[in-house]
Image (cartoon, rainbow, N blue to C red):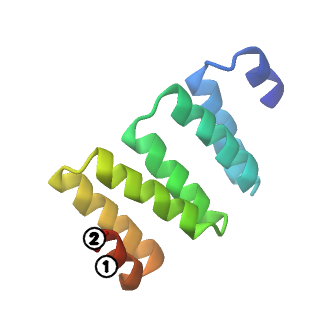
Amino acid sequence: LTGLLATRPLDAELLQDTIDTAVASQRLPDAIRFQQQLVALDATPQAWQRLARLHRQAGQPLQALQIWDRILEEQGSESNVIATVDEVKIVHGDQIVARLILS
C-alpha cells in the first residue's frame, strides 16, 4: 500500500487503508505519520481525534494531550467538549482531565 500511496498521495481512502494496515500490524509510528498526512489533507475533527488516539497508543500521552487541547480550542462547542473530555478521562484519568478543563 505504501508504494501505491507514493503514486497517489492525495487519495484519502488509500491513506485511510494504509493507516488501518499499519495499526493492525502494530506499526504505530507509521500509522501516526500517515494520519498526520491525512490531517494535512482533510483536517476533520475525527481525523484529529484519531491522531490523538494513535499518539496515546504509541505511549505519547503529551502529544495526544496537545491535540486534545487543540480540538477543544478549535471546536469548543458543548458537545465536542464533552466528547473530548470523556475520551481524555478514559485514556488518562481524572488528573489530566482536570488540567485539560482548567487550562
Judging depth in this view, the residue of 70 and 82 nearest the camera is: 70
The C terminus, quarter of image = bottom left
Q: Which residue is mark 2?
A: 101
The N terminus, quarter of image = top right
Residue density around tag 2, few if under 14, some if 14–19, many if 20 or more, within 10 Å: few
Judging depth in this view, the residue of 13 and 99 nearest the camera is: 99
Mark 1: amino acid: Ala
Residue density around tag 1, few if under 14, some if 14–19, many if 20 or more, within 10 Å: few
Taking the view exactly as shown, the residue that stands out farthest to the front is 103
- Residue 8, percent across and down? 70, 16
Identify whether 71 is placed above or below 8. Answer: below
Mark 2: amino acid: Ile
Q: Secondary structure at mark 2?
A: helix
Residue drawn at the location 41% of the way across and 78% of the way down: 96
Identify whether 94 is placed above or below 90. Answer: below
- Residue 32, percent across and down? 65, 48
Taking the view exactly as shown, the residue that stands out farthest to the left is 78
Identify whether 53 is placed above or below 88. Answer: above
Residue 67 appears left or right of 98: right
Q: Secondary structure at mark 1?
A: helix
Residue drawn at the location 47% of the way across and 54% of the way down: 67
Q: Which residue is mark 1?
A: 98
The label shown at residue 51 is: none
Circles 1 and 2: CB atoms closer than 8 Å:
yes
Judging depth in this view, the residue of 96 and 20 nearest the camera is: 96
The answer for how far apart the CA atoms under marks 1 and 2 are is: 5 Å
Q: How many marks?
A: 2
Residue drawn at the location 67% of the way across and 64% of the way down: 58
